[in-house]
Image (tube, rainbow, N blue to C red):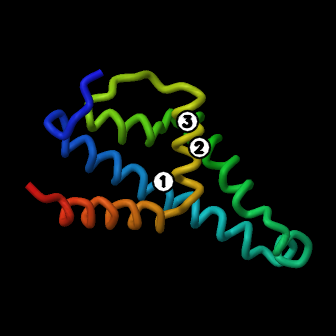
Amino acid sequence: MNMSLETLDVGQLGAAFALWIMVAIAIEEAGNGLFNWKHFKDNLGGKGLKTPIIFVVSVLVCAYFKTDIFLALIGSVGIDSESNWLSIGMSALLLTGGSGTVFRTINRIREAQENVTD
């Protein structure tokens, strides 16, 4: 496994981020329909169920559509692996954070790049 910035595939990384943001937004919007439903708000709102529900939905989406965002991200730096329960779980965790997690990650990468000194 050769993992370094020299092996960074920027195109693959960009595609992985695009996939991540699109799936995260789709899951957020689907979740909004459920979480804004009067019955959910009245009976289940405020009980800490949103995060576990979104995680389960994310696992199902990743597994059913063979959408392994974590594998796509690490593949961009040269890590070659096959999709498995751990990478699907990691993808679901990334999605559970929502689209805000994608943007925070992009900003962290920008900040790290700015702080790199030769």
Q: Residues within 10 Å of mark 2 (few under 14, many from 20)?
A: some
Mark 3 vs 1, N-terminal side: 1
Disc 1: which residue: 23
Instruction: Tell me if residue 79 comes above or below residue 116 in the rendering.
Output: above
The residue under label 1 is which amino acid type?
Val
Whether tag 2 and tag 1 are in contact, CB under 8 A, the answer is yes
Taking depth in this image into account, of 97 and 110 the one nearest to the observer is 110
| Residue at mark 2 to residue at mark 1: CA–CA distance | 9 Å
Question: Residue at left 20%, top 60%?
Answer: 113
Mark linked to residue 88: 3
Question: Residue at left 50%, top 58%?
Answer: 24
| Residue at mark 2 to residue at mark 3: CA–CA distance | 10 Å
Q: Nearer the viewer, mark 2 or mark 3?
A: 3
Q: Nearer the viewer, mark 3 or mark 1?
A: 3
Mark 2 vs 3, N-terminal side: 2
Mark 2: secondary structure: helix
Instruction: Tell me if residue 81 comes above or below residue 104 in the rendering.
Output: above
